[in-house]
Amino acid sequence: MSGLLGKIDAILAAALAAFGEASEVKALEEARVKYLGVKGQLTEQSRTVGSLPPAERPAAGQAVNLALKEAKAAHQAAAARLERANSQKPGLDVTLPGRRRALGRQHLISRTMDEICEIFERLGFSVVEGPEVETDYYNFEALNFPADHPSRDMQESLFVGEGLLLRTHTSPVQIRTMEKRKPPVWIVAPGKTYRRDDDITHSPMFHQVEGLVVDQGITMADLKGVLSAFATAFFSPDTAIRLRPSFFPFTEPSAEVDIACVLCGGRGCRLCKGSGWLELLGSGMVDPALYKYVGYEGEGVTGFAFGLGVDRAAMLKYGLSNIRHLYEGDLRFLEQF
């Protein structure tokens, strides 16, 4: 009996000392678990009372209970002491200016693409989208590309499987749309495209907005009028355009569209290499050969199509010298816009 009481007194003394010396909440919690936890030393002593002879149990039980009570009171006092000490530490100074959270902003590419689509929507076009992984049929065959066209070679386009490739333009969206709709069709198709190009003016992944109009009585004059309206809305009201003869497999006749140099206004400078003009996009009247792929033969319709590189449009509008600036993620550059 005397041995148990002595052991209880020793454990209590150690517990009181540990609680009193704790200078951090973590240390106090470790001391509580050691002495008052489920398997704590004082808690374990209370379980030994039942093994004593019946005559000794009342005195032993009273001693253990008093020790537990005293230890719990010491723990609570230590916890209160640490709480007061922590509350007196320097806290939030409400007089200091706050740290403003940096707000994100729309990337220049997304902003330019949205602006282009918005202009064409005001001109009566609707926006449609399609898959970025395309079949050879939609990307080439249904667009009148001959079987031996260079862009169908593995070294020119990014093929991902048998007859599957990352689309080289958003023109497949035009075919998919015409398969589902009867004329009139007035659409623009924005999205990512992929080619094996990589220099200061080309990127392996870039963005396009392509347009298609198929309706009754559409002429080259309608094409020029729409593109002129776009150029003046996107660049400036006095922006002039010109059409140069060109070739595309899916349009006939075809034309490259230039705008008056955004830097010199057409007078000639280093940007336009003295010509006064900058190439903007490709366009032309829809080749009637395409209509057989979408069931438009016999409809008596004509149409035009055009394709605009969003990245190039952004470079021209904002005076960028290197297309890589758009993809390097340098906030010092991106936050300027």
Image (tube, grey):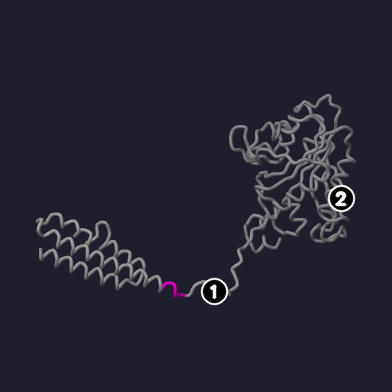
Residue 146: x %, y % from top left: 73, 32
Identify the residue at horizontal 18%, vertical 69% (top origin).
10
The region drawn magenta spans 85-89
Q: Nearer the viewer, residue 143 or 210?
A: 210
Residue 122: x %, y % from top left: 82, 46
Please give the label number shown on residue 241: 2
Q: Tell which tag, 1 or 2, sits nearer the viewer.
A: 1
Identify the residue at horizontal 15%, vertical 66% (top origin).
7
| Pointer 2 local density, CA inside 10 Å: few below 14, some 14–19, many at least 20 | many
Q: What secondary structure do most residues of the magenta stretch adopt?
A: helix
The answer to whether residue 109 is left or right of residue 300 is left
**Local SS, label 1:** loop
Identify the residue at horizontal 74%, vertical 48% (top origin).
309
Please give the label number shown on residue 93: 1
Q: In which image quadrant can residue 320 be found? A: bottom right
Report if residue 90 lies within the magenta region: no
